[in-house]
Image (cartoon, coloured by chain):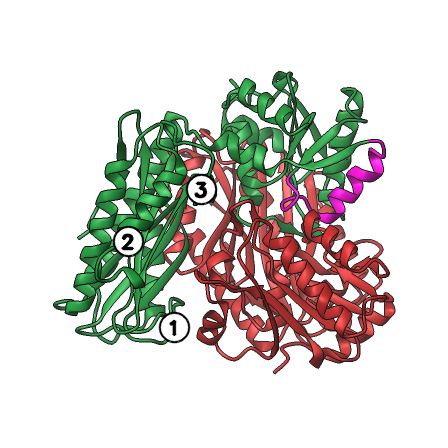
Chain colours: A red, B green
Amino acid sequence: MMPFEGDRLTRSMRARNVDVVLATSRHNVRYLTGGYYLSFYARASRFGAGQYLSVVGIPAERPASAFYVGRQDAILNEQDYIEAFGPLWITDRHWIQRGPSMSAAAAEAAAQVLRRQGLAGSTVGIESSFLPADAFDALRRALPEASFADATPILADLRAVKRPDELERLRQVHQMTAEAIRAVLAEGRPEETTRQIAARAQRRIEERGASFLYAFTNVGPGFLRAPSSERWGRGRSMHLDVGAELEEYIADVARMGSIGAPPALAADLFTACLDAQKQVRGAIGAGLPCRDLWRIGTEAVTAGRWGPYGRFLAHGLGMVSHEPPEVTRDSGRSLEASMVVSIETEYLHPDAGHVKLEDTVVVTPTGHEGLGDVARE
Amino acid sequence: MMPFEGDRLTRSMRARNVDVVLATSRHNVRYLTGGYYLSFYARASRFGAGQYLSVVGIPAERPASAFYVGRQDAILNEQDYIEAFGPLWITDRHWIQRGPSMSAAAAEAAAQVLRRQGLAGSTVGIESSFLPADAFDALRRALPEASFADATPILADLRAVKRPDELERLRQVHQMTAEAIRAVLAEGRPEETTRQIAARAQRRIEERGASFLYAFTNVGPGFLRAPSSERWGRGRSMHLDVGAELEEYIADVARMGSIGAPPALAADLFTACLDAQKQVRGAIGAGLPCRDLWRIGTEAVTAGRWGPYGRFLAHGLGMVSHEPPEVTRDSGRSLEASMVVSIETEYLHPDAGHVKLEDTVVVTPTGHEGLGDVARE
């Protein structure tokens, strides 16, 4: 069964004058197939003289005519992987052999399908930041009468409202990440470097079954966020901002910790973070214009004694960080139920360092549900 | 200090008529910088409406005029990351801001440097399978008088002979992987699915400090290698072929196991694998033509009773799997000391399944050194 709303996709394609979408990024291939990506290349696509590329093609009005291009040869039988994965709703499948340019070969195979479907002269939507140059050249050579447009916003908008199973993955990965951060902060020893702390964050994420993405580690005072030979110690607060991934869904969580009692200034700034989060969460619900969310958050953070040091940021989160909904001064859209928003409240004070709280919420018809609301205080 | 031989790179560029190389893949950026890649994006480059792209540019004859393009803004101070990483030999650094198209912006910044260096009309070597389409378009727009050529083979050849620190990384990751496979096979329980076995391989790799890439799991009879709901049981042999990564260096190791005594046929085929490996290893040393290595391996595997089921494959291994040296019937090159070759001997017999042994060796002046030679029997 198609794991997205075909009508919603068609409307978005028509609004941008795109006749057929070719998805080539790992995240959009997974999204459109319903979770499938050839596991051999999922964690490293480089191989031989190029990289693996698979393609999901979906024509407007006829999403059921979608096709898939993958790899098939003596070494790697992708049909077996698809069988092991479970049923794939796309039944029109095409296979390229291993060779010096797998990415160009996949694009050529996709171009042939478009020609057979009568779409050789159409406007083809590509992921322009996720289509390799050799694949794009192969498409242009094979379809000289086609036009090309960037389909990135079409696919990002399609993903903005999450399905229940997507929300469940996001719940899981945020819970794992918040618990991993709690464990890392609780284990903190004086004189440990922030590089060692980041390495522990990776282990604590991985042992919970998620993939580690990154860690920002700021020990105040000063704003250095890169894991380094800087040492955490008594009377210094630390922010640990960690990214993790579970089956393509991203968690983005920041927490504060200190060894012994936190410095008074850091404690004050953290209280301001919590207060601002509370105000923002109180306003969230389906129908709230995103520009109002931006205004409420910005006012909450910049009001009061520490305002001049404050910063507010909110962004959509799912398979991609900073995906729709966009939350800026000028956003035209409103929140919808089952959108997911990460809320960052932070103060950068030269004496205390970078004090930050970041959490993610699901928009509900009447309010919000917090994801991974563990150890916020 | 430059972590590669500038003269070797220049010769290779001149042989292919390339005036300047622009590296954009994570592995080649790491190779040319000496190990650096912005850690925030190293495990997931997707962000917002595009993906992160950094560029290392190196002109022929003047490798010391190399430049770096990275990202810099209020959220992410890449200069801090480079400081935390240690000294970076490339001092000509350029920064792009976060924006809707980070990859195109990085390419535009690189084009400006090329113009200032007098290379606007030159032949620019790109990684055509690792340069995003929007970045390539930005380069072509900014440098209409330039020509473009694929620099993938130039960079792959540069990496073929490994430095001592690279060999040490490859030793470590092969040892970790071989030990992880041994642990997974030793823990094998009847009725476990190959999907569960692959998940255990991931945990055993990660707890040793490497990154898991993939697992092939074949339980004979039959040739299915995808992790699935197939179950391993008494009297059935299994091959476990695992990929792992440590600081960009890849291990590729396959071992056989069985619960209880292996089936007699599988044991026979495995003895044939071992014998063929022994013959191939006995021939390896600096100066051996790669085509001779291919012939010796192919003859060793296809001779004898099980020959019709045999298959031989050897390939270079380092930051990329199946990198130079190329080992085929027609290879023109010879092995050099400090090249690294992965040797695969396997038999696909319908009654026994896919029986395989894969190991990696470093070529030495007089022979070879095995990497991760653990639990081969």
Name the residue nearer the viewer: B168 or B338.
B338
Residue segment shown in magenta? B127-145
Pointer 1 residue: B228
Q: CA distance from mark 1 to mark 3?
A: 34 Å
Is B128 within the magenta? yes
The three-letter code of the residue at mark 3 reads: Ala
**Residue drawn at x 47%, y 62% as measured from the top left:** A39
> Mark 3 — residue?
A198
**Which residue: 68% across, 28% down?**
B18
Q: Is residue A251 magenta?
A: no
For the residue marked with disc 2, what is the amino acid?
Val
Residue in view at x 30 percent, y 24 percent: B365
Picture layout, residue B77 above or below residue A285: above
In terms of image quadrants, where is residue A149?
bottom right
Kind of residue indicated by mark 1: Ser
Q: Secondary structure at mark 3?
A: helix
Q: Is residue A224 visible?
A: no
Protein chain holding label 2: B
Do labels 3 and 2 touch, CB within 8 Å? Answer: no
Res B201 → quadrant: bottom left
Say which of B355 and B162 sits in front: B355
Q: Can marks 1 and 3 be said to lie on one chain?
A: no
Tag in front: 1 or 3 = 1
N-terminal of the pair, mark 2 or mark 1, is 1
In three-dimensional space, the C-alpha distance between marks 2 and 1, rounded to whole angstroms, equals 29 Å
Residue that numbered label 2 is attached to: B301
Name the subunit of mark 3. Answer: A
